[in-house]
Amino acid sequence: MNELLERIVADCAPSASLGHVATYIPELANVDPNKLGIYVSSEDGKQYFAGDHLEPFTMQSVVKPLILLQALMDSGEDAVRTLVGVEATGKPFDAFNYSDQALNSANINPMINTGAIALCTLIHGETYEEKFSRLLDLARKLSDNPELNVDHAVYVSEKKTGNKNRALGYMLTAYGMITDPVEEILDCYFRACSISVNCRDLARIAHIFANHGIHPETQEQMFPAAYAKYVNATLATCGMYDGSGEFALTVGFPAKSGVGGGIMGVIPHRMGIGVFAPALDKHGNSVAGVQALAKLSQILDLSIY
Amino acid sequence: MNELLERIVADCAPSASLGHVATYIPELANVDPNKLGIYVSSEDGKQYFAGDHLEPFTMQSVVKPLILLQALMDSGEDAVRTLVGVEATGKPFDAFNYSDQALNSANINPMINTGAIALCTLIHGETYEEKFSRLLDLARKLSDNPELNVDHAVYVSEKKTGNKNRALGYMLTAYGMITDPVEEILDCYFRACSISVNCRDLARIAHIFANHGIHPETQEQMFPAAYAKYVNATLATCGMYDGSGEFALTVGFPAKSGVGGGIMGVIPHRMGIGVFAPALDKHGNSVAGVQALAKLSQILDLSIY
Amino acid sequence: MNELLERIVADCAPSASLGHVATYIPELANVDPNKLGIYVSSEDGKQYFAGDHLEPFTMQSVVKPLILLQALMDSGEDAVRTLVGVEATGKPFDAFNYSDQALNSANINPMINTGAIALCTLIHGETYEEKFSRLLDLARKLSDNPELNVDHAVYVSEKKTGNKNRALGYMLTAYGMITDPVEEILDCYFRACSISVNCRDLARIAHIFANHGIHPETQEQMFPAAYAKYVNATLATCGMYDGSGEFALTVGFPAKSGVGGGIMGVIPHRMGIGVFAPALDKHGNSVAGVQALAKLSQILDLSIY
Amino acid sequence: MNELLERIVADCAPSASLGHVATYIPELANVDPNKLGIYVSSEDGKQYFAGDHLEPFTMQSVVKPLILLQALMDSGEDAVRTLVGVEATGKPFDAFNYSDQALNSANINPMINTGAIALCTLIHGETYEEKFSRLLDLARKLSDNPELNVDHAVYVSEKKTGNKNRALGYMLTAYGMITDPVEEILDCYFRACSISVNCRDLARIAHIFANHGIHPETQEQMFPAAYAKYVNATLATCGMYDGSGEFALTVGFPAKSGVGGGIMGVIPHRMGIGVFAPALDKHGNSVAGVQALAKLSQILDLSIY
């Protein structure tokens, strides 16, 4: 299996040249576009890996399923559903073009920025610092990595340049969907996006979603199975931005990508996968990462369809 | 199992009152809104059913996966992908609002009318009558029902009132995506939508998609496994109109609905399901049908996520 | 004055190289892009002209004010307003992107294709041939040119390639805004667009609109003054496609352009102007024609603002 | 003439019941919806008025032509045109639905919030307090009213609830169209909207635009004639929100409305008019105010078309 992963890394690394690293957050532009790592946390308890699987990168949108999960755990499904819907939007993840009639929960999903920002308000905590702490704790627990922390330089860069997110935040405020101060909510959101992880961390987190909330070693139920299915279903339809349909065809399992270059793949009942390759396609998905997952899916027959 | 289905039918039939039968095709408005039937074609070769499972209804959009499959079989995946993309649009199935910059394959999928009309041109045949014959033959073979035929009254009604589809057809023509005469293509499409089936027919067809192309009794490979996964993945992300995300959460498997009230459910490796209940929700999906599938999914743990 | 016009023609003709002749109607692609003609029908009864003012070209969208006028004369303002609104759309003249909630009269104006096609149904006549005859008669009377007729080659070309207009026609039908057969309405519309005129014809027609319906020589009231103001106001806000605001700034009077390269300018109480130069800008307006009108407006202080 | 105005006030006041006062800025909800005032500053130097012409109200969007004028005077036409276009958008004044491809100057005009906010950056001044001072000075000079000042309660209310404008501001920032701090720009904008005026003030300002920049009594050229035409043309096509086409038909001259209930009407070469009646129609235009202007226009033949 490690050999298979090595071969896939060797085969897919060159395709990085077809993409570009994200530049809209200046700090993200500084990464080496040719990195490629992969890590599999498997049903048999075994861990497999190849390439730059220990290279750190920031979660960016990969944190969105965790925001959704924490909101579900803290406020319940009804509150989440009232605020944020579940349909794919057919638009980029940071799109503005809500018509005036249509900014409501039905047109937002938890995997676009608008939805993830809104869901931060449903996490418990007196302050947004507390809310973020809960989220970081969740990431640490699910990844079995108590060292997880914010990449401060990325966080600062993100906060400085995140004006599209500010616009989305004030739009949510204008429509009465959120009431807390926008800058505080965004501070929590920017920190969350800036959590530094590696492929192993993503694979471990994904594995628990694949296991419907049960820790693969301790067998502890970390969160309700229903929430795992909620998150997994949402990833299947909306997880790969407006490339989710394409990903369902070519790879075929729930996954979430981030503009940091990471992808977290969830194969229900079987395994969790983390990949990292920072050059992105036009939708914001890792080029070499998607290709590596496609190969792995084909060889191991991982498609759920 | 039949007992379980009977109970589900009894529990879900009343919810028909929350929906309305389709009226935009006058013939469809004449059905009894309180019908509810369900049929399961199962992995063990057994067939289960309850309620109005023998009641005939027209396929309507449920025929779209068959159009996609026939186009794949006749012209191959590349031709299909060049014409029609795979992303959910975030819009109703008969939406017009393509911006002038954006009418291209990337913004069309095979489960919206625009995409299904375009795909008719990729079915082999000298004439559109021949193309339709191939499609009808496919439906007959997959359902093991050589009696399948067009409901002539619905077809005539559809042809007479299908002006939105005419508009979509001429739009495709205007953008150079189709070149055959619009009325001929639409005639094929209207006939396809008017194929009369019952729950058993849908369950049998679905079962072969679930079996990745292999006939459950004869074990014959009716079409390539890759095409089954292509169709199933597309159903998972786009099959239930702009209610596909909701359906993934509450039911959790690939499915296709039609405004005739039918739903075809595909549970990979396990079973095919056909339900029929003509009162529809605002997305065009059968209210009682979705509810019945949700109950069945929960009880039998059918979600793939 | 003729000298002034000669100078303007000489100055503006070279700017034709900044535009392109329309190609979507094949016949229109055959014209010489370097023609430039201008004709002024003035308040003092005098007629001035320069350049290719006798060159024939088809009216195309310049016929829209005549369709609006005939609809007003035949069916009255209330009927017109019920069918077609008066607001600029912010979109190209042949845009499709009506949201499903919003295809109604409020989102259509008489100067976009959708509106002009709809208004053809309000012209009196047993058949669409009769309706078109009334329209042609109106054009002949207002231009004092009984020889005006359809350019048959352009009409045939237009009918053959007019699939976007077919799409718009079926969309109007689908929303119940028109009920007559689409092909018949479009036949009338295509003929109207194909009426062959020259700069003099446009200037004469424009002069009567400028005179609020009164023939400048005979003093006959050809149509109610209120309808002239209706048309002129509509031209001022919507007459130059989605370049109407720009035209108001740089030229400053009601005008209507067509993709044949003609522009009809109306200076209330003062004069009518016809220009022709077939190379178009991105909005579909004659490049050299707009420039010539801008110069003339500045020199003669023709802006109404 | 005063008698005529009295009659119009008496006739039109009851139509206030067809509208509603603006409520999205809480302070605006407190006004008496039945007020109606009108003031005419005429070509003969005479001043006419009737009804509540001395009632104070805040300018709101009526200040937009002054922002445009000050930006033109301070930074020139090229800078203004680079930042903000001139086409009607076909959308409400505070619409968000810019597609991601299309947030650029071509899709913004100076009479929608996005455009007016952007233009504040082109006013000279070290600070936004200084920029606002220049704007207030301009309003005072053009109205011959050195007492003009901000209604502090409205300004505070506006600043507190203006989240849609914050969203628009951050969107402009995200697309690189503005670079100054959003809150500072908005502070200037909110102050400008909160300038308290009466019908006389608006009529006086309008009169100078009608006179192409020349003060009607002193004959001083307050600003270039070209800028007056620029503003007047923009008002004619975009001044009455997405009711500008309707206003051109029924009234027929350049005008600017505000959600405070004021309308400033410019009749080139003839007069300036100010009206006030706070109950608004669905576009945000004063119901009784528009009706009063329509009557006056008809009786005095004020339409420029």
Image (spheres, coloured by chain):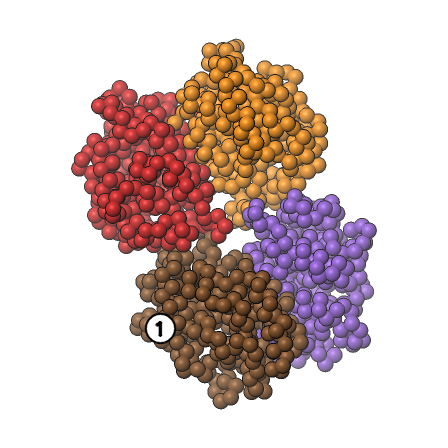
Chain colours: A brown, B purple, C orange, D red
Q: Position of residue B83 (x, y in %)?
A: 67, 54
Say which quarter of the image contains residue C165. Answer: top right
Left or right: residue B105 versus residue D27 is: right
Residue B257 seen anywhere in this rendered image of the structure: yes
- Tell me where residue A32 appears, x and y as whole percent: 49, 68
Q: Residue D82, position in %: x, y?
A: 41, 41
Asked if residue B124 is positioned above or below residue A290 in the image, the reply reads above
Total tally of numbered discs in the picture = 1
The residue shown at (41%, 70%) is: A194
Q: Residue reaching furthest left?
A: D147
Residue toward you, C277 or D219? C277
Name the residue at 40% across, 25% down.
C304
Most foreground residue, A150 or D1 = A150
* Direction from residue C164 to residue D251 in the image, left or right: left
How busy is the neighbourhood of tag 1: few (under 14 within 10 Å), some, or many (20 plus)? many
Type of residue at label 1?
Lys
Q: Residue at x 70, y 55 (%)?
A: B119
> Quick check: A125 above or below A160?
below
Quarter occupied by the C terminus of chain D: top left
Report the side of D10 relative to C232 (left or right): left
Foreground of the two, C280 or D263: C280
Q: Of helix, strand and loop, which one carries label 1?
A: helix
Image location of residue D271, percent across then percent down: 30, 25
Say which quadrant the N terminus of chain D sits in: top left
Query: Which residue, given by chain and number where applicable, does mark 1 sit on?
Result: A131
Q: Is residue B19 visible?
A: no
Chain at tag 1: A
Q: Residue furthest bottom?
A: A218
Name the residue located 49 percent from the left edge and 78 percent from the top edge: A54
